[in-house]
Image (spheres, rainbow, N blue to C red):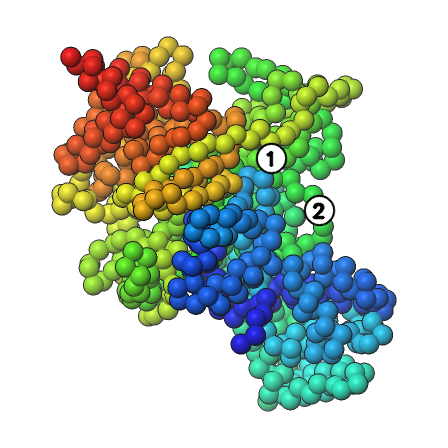
Amino acid sequence: MAYSELIKNFNRIRDYMREFYVYGFKSRDEYSRKSARSYDDEKRRLESWLGDYMQFRQTPEGKTVFLSIDSRVSRHNPLYAAWKTKSFTDGDMTLHFILFDILHSPGTALTLKEITGLVDEYLSSFDEPRMFDSSTVRKKLNEYVSEGIVVSEKRGKTMYYRRAEDGDLPDPDVLDFFSEAAPCGVIGSFLLDKADAHRDHFAFKHHYITGAMDSEIVCLLFAAMSEKRSITIESINRHKDRLSENRVVPLRLMISAQSGRQYLMAYVPRLNRIISFRTDNIASVRPGEVSERFDELREKLDGMIPNMWGVSTQSRSGGRMEHVEFTVRYGESEAHIHQRLEREKRCGTVERIDDHTSRFSADVFDSSELVPWIRTFICRITDFSFSNKALEAQFREDIEEMYRLYGLGEVAEDDLQ
Amino acid sequence: MIFSELYSTYYDTVARVLKAAVEHPLKKDELRDIIEKNAFGESILNIEPALAEGRWQLIRPDGSTPLRYPPSTPMTTLEKRWLKAVYADPRIRLFTDEDIFPGIEPLFTAEDYCVFDKYSDGDPYDDEAYQKTFLLMLDAIEKRYPLSIDTANRKGGTARLVMMPEFLEYSEKDDKFRLRGSGCRYGDTVNLARIVRCEPYEGTFSRAPRTRLRPRTQKVEFELIDKRNALERVLMHFAHFEKQAERIGFDRYRVTISYDRDDETEMVIRILSFGPMIRVTAPKHFIELIKERLKAQKSCER
């Protein structure tokens, strides 16, 4: 098939965008093991959509392509562009604008026959007018009914079609802000495309934009949750390069503001457990039957939250719960460290031991999830204790390894002598 | 479906073309200009011929259109459901008290998702004084007038700043808004929650020298060893910065990240959080910052 700037299926480009944006070090050879042409086409598309952000680097392994975006500077998520690239037929485009011109006023309700006749009239001024039969027009109108932009109503035996009532667009500030700060923000970006030109008033710090690529999946998960439906998810194991299917009850989307990852917390009947699935690993969502246990399962998840640091619901040590605690020391002008503990803890308790010492402790399903956070206090950790002793040993060894990495290990040995 | 031609850049661009054509027959240059401004880099190769050759029968050869009205499409149900969900977000009170679309189900509710690692001392979005300050700032940014701002400092006192507000910066991690402004010698960032008084500055605003907002970009370079899935974790974690990554060995990578000088301490602790999977290699002063922390840690263990 000839190259087209537009695409029919989002999943392939989703993978390429992730590779170019998150990783960005692979050469063409590494991507093109499956298909060199596919790589060239996807790269060309991304250059066309996101040209300003595409960068190239020559390495001994070949030319590498990557997307480099400082999301603090770009006021809108550039990756949303990919969601605006769906292909269509020539007829789709022609019919769309003519239909909404015919149905310009919400008060105009017409039959299929009347609409088809008017479409012919619109096209009669072209040298070789296209002909749309009534079944094509009906199909398009019904598509628009399901999207909520056309309303159909039966009068007697005849179906009438009219434009749906529209609402006013919110203030552009609302759209500018929430298109970046709310889930499925790409929908806000669609609305912004309809808004008048205006100045942006917002910028975003610590702003992860990768979740945009999972918008369709997240939208389907929300739809299933609002109907309390089971779903079948197809997920990718990237390490094993394998797809697997799971029937689950979706319970909540957990979004990380510190890593940009999004997870689905879901009950898996096969395991009789609530576990997490990364949304960027979910390839498809198929809705199933309504789950009678939805409310009970969500309540169960609520009960688990006080013992979850992240999204893990199972300890690595095999125990039901793991205990972790650590103590930090701070100086006269560092009282904010205690505040930091309070502000940043997601569960557990912070105890002020004295004016210069505070202790954090928690019982969690998986204490390994706390390790990165505890490391941020390196320079003031006076004591730490994990009930998972293997993890405790690893934590200690990691700090030793850091001393060695920065040439501080030998000094310690000298000190011991 | 989110992935639909209804939301596509091509439909949007053609709507703009037709809006102009309803007013007057379009000249080729005008058509090209609209396409180049609104569509993708290569779109001109598709949209212009599709319209000119009559594959999309919307523009006649003389540049006129059979359409009678400027194109408009009503909001889809998906768009209304998303807006309905947004209007239930506590932060919407910063913009409006109105409700929207009665009878429409929100796409999601507060029960359906949570940001599990944002800090717990977020801004007070339901506080009336905070809301007033927020709206005043939006107005001042739009209309370009200076503000006089009293902020509470850590010592319990207040400090007065006069600045030209440029934009509001939101951090989801901190769940805070900050005003970024210019022209003030005492800084260019004010936490909204710390403001105790804010009003339009009535005096003659004279911009202090060298106080324009400009990027203060620094770079840090580190080597990464891909153990315990560190490659993915690190690159995802630092994804929001401008960065470059290259493979330098079987499981080793060199990563360069550009960051704001003001955020250096935060950058240090974010790098420390990856433990021995990361070794900073440049610049020297950044290596020293890491070493200082490690030395201090050593002293804690004695």
Which disc, if any, is residue A198? 2
- Which of the 4 image quadrants contains residue B227? top left
On the image, the x and y values in percent for residue B123 come to: 49, 32
The crowding category of the residue bearing disc 1, from other C-alpha atoms within 10 Å (few below 14, some 14 to 19, many at least 20), is: many
The crowding category of the residue bearing disc 2, from other C-alpha atoms within 10 Å (few below 14, some 14 to 19, many at least 20), is: few
Mark 1, residue position: B168
Please report the residue visible at 49 percent of the width from the left and 52 percent of the height from the top: A63
Q: Is residue A149 above or below residue A15?
A: below
> Which residue is farthest front?
A60
Q: Is residue B54 above or below residue B128?
A: below
Q: Secondary structure at mark 1?
A: strand
- Which of the 4 image quadrants contains residue B47? bottom right
Q: Chain of mark 2?
A: A
Q: Nearer the viewer, residue A338 or B181?
A: B181
The answer to whether residue A397 is seen in the rendering is yes
- Identity, as a three-letter code, of the amino acid under mark 2: His
- Identity, as a three-letter code, of the amino acid under mark 1: Leu
On the image, the x and y values in percent for residue A356 come to: 31, 13
Q: Nearer the viewer, residue B252 or A134?
A: B252
Q: Is residue A58 above or below residue B267?
A: below
Q: Secondary structure at mark 2?
A: loop
Q: Chain of mark 1?
A: B
On the image, the x and y values in percent for residue B260 come to: 53, 30
Q: Nearer the viewer, residue A281 or A101?
A: A281
